[in-house]
């Protein structure tokens, strides 16, 4: 299914090398002020950067087809369209018989037969996130009207890890550099890690941290529609995501309860916690602290090095070298995608819980 959400529903359409990609966002309240320029700005943030990204150069101009008139939402479905103009599909026919390691070629063909569109990754491509980011920009506006900010930054690239404690401001400030790192110093160290991988004909993964600040206590729908569960479902749909943790995450497995438990305190007359190893969530419900999550992004599957694969028609092992235009690291471009995905889920849960009318 290409639709997700309950009160605020997102549908993605298009393919990487088809005529267009886009999104339909249904459920946005009528009369909401929508800054179309801000939507475009968010989409521009996911474009590849010189020296560390794919040479594919798409304009990614967002066209509003329906749902917004005179800068306000009408209450009807908001349709956002982005045309594909810089495509090169010449090298993809072979992958139906010789699947690329790390890609969805084999599983996609198994499920959809020879009719599957593997050009540029088809519907499994990161290109599909353009519509997600455009729709997420509207969700962020809806949340910001209520004092909720969602921002992300790159926590790690390869072996280079930012170990400083960060807050939502770090995500906002990361927009000042192309690596989406919290500081310029971290950005340069991460850049060198990416360049090193690219020079080896290889790729490198990373970790994106996302923080949502200003959420009230009580958002979340246990038992099965918890904040963590809904966020995880959305974020695992993002191509390249292989792991998610909240708060202390996997490190909590090495803690004792006395260390992990967050003591309750009173701050400006509001109940808060002295630290935030729970990541702002208790019992699947927001507890008033910032929601903190981290997403592991795998190394880009398309690399310049030769790899071993299998010709599934002949049954013979074969060598495969992937040609084309690919990012040596997708973590920086994933930052606005993670922000958008988180904002869409939190806006939907806010509507379900009555925080947003």
Image (cartoon, rainbow, N blue to C red):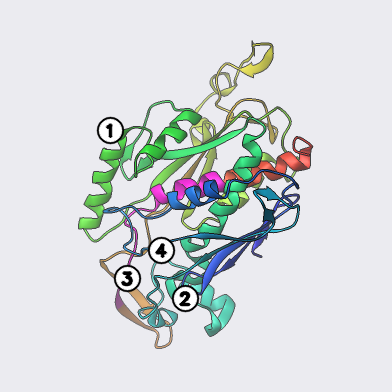
Determine whether label 4 and label 3 are within 8 Å by CB.
no
Q: Reading the chain from its start, which is encountered first: label 4 or label 3?
A: 4
Distance Cα–Cα, label 1 vs label 3: 31 Å
Please state which of the two labelled residues, at mark 2 or mark 1, is closer to the viewer: 1
* 67 with respect to 131 (left or right): right
Image quadrant containing the N terminus = bottom right
Q: Label for residue 118? A: 2
Distance Cα–Cα, label 2 vs label 1: 39 Å
Please state which of the two labelled residues, at mark 1 or mark 4, is closer to the viewer: 4
Image spot of residue 64 (x, y percent): 60, 59
Determine whether label 4 and label 2 are within 8 Å by CB.
no
| Element under disc 4 | loop
**Residue behind mark 4:** 58
Distance Cα–Cα, label 4 vs label 3: 15 Å
Please tell me how crowded label 1 is: few (under 14), some (14-19), or many (20+) other residues with Cα within 10 Å: few
* 216 with respect to 249 (left or right): right
| Element under disc 2 | loop
Q: Is residue 165 above or below residue 50?
A: above
Image spot of residue 152 (x, y percent): 48, 39
**Residue behind mark 1:** 185
| 327 in magenta | yes
Distance Cα–Cα, label 1 vs label 4: 29 Å
| Element under disc 3 | loop
| Element under disc 1 | helix
Image spot of residue 3 (x, y percent): 67, 60
Q: Can you name the residue that lies furthest to the bottom here?
A: 314
In the image, the segment drawn in magenta is: 319-340
**Residue behind mark 3:** 324
| 254 in magenta | no
Q: Reading the chain from its start, which is encountered first: label 4 or label 2?
A: 4
Image spot of residue 134 (x, y percent): 56, 53
As rendered, which of 350 and 25 lies closer to the eye? 25
């Amino acid at each position: 299914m290409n639709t997700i959400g309950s009160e605020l529903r997102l549908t993605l359409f298009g393919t990487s090398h088809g005529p267009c990609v886009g999104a339909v966002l249904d459920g946005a309240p009528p009369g909401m002020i929508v800054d179309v320029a801000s939507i475009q700005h968010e989409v521009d943030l996911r474009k590849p950067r010189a020296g560390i990204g794919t040479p594919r150069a798409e304009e990614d101009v967002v066209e509003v087809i329906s749902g917004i008139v005179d800068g306000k939402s009408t209450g009807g479905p908001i349709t956002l369209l982005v045309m594909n103009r810089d495509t090169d599909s010449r090298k993809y026919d072979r992958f139906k018989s010789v699947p690329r390691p790390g890609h969805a070629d084999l599983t996609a063909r198994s499920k959809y037969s020879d009719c599957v569109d593997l050009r540029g990754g088809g519907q499994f491509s990161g290109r599909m996130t353009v519509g997600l980011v455009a729709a997420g920009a509207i969700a962020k506006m809806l949340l910001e009207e209520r004092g909720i900010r969602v921002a992300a930054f790159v926590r790690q690239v390869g072996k280079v890890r930012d170990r400083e404690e960060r807050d939502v401001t770090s995500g906002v400030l990361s927009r000042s550099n192309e690596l989406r790192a919290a500081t310029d110093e971290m950005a340069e160290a991460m850049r060198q890690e990416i360049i090193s991988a690219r020079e080896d004909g290889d790729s490198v993964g990373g970790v994106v941290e996302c923080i949502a600040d200003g959420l009230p206590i009580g958002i979340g729908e246990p038992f099965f529609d918890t904040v963590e569960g809904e966020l995880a479902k959305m974020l695992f749909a993002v191509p390249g995501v292989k792991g998610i943790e909240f708060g202390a995450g996997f490190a909590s497995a090495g803690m004792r309860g006395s260390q992990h438990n967050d003591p309750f305190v009173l701050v400006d007359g509001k109940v808060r916690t002295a630290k935030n190893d729970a990541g702002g969530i208790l019992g699947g419900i927001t507890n008033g602290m910032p929601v903190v999550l981290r997403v592991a992004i795998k190394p880009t599957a398309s690399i310049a090095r030769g790899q071993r694969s299998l010709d599934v028609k002949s049954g013979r092992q074969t060598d495969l070298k992937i040609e084309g235009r690919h990012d040596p690291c997708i973590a920086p471009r994933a930052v606005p995608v993670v922000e958008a995905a988180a904002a869409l889920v939190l806006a939907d849960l806010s509507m379900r819980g009555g925080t947003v009318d």
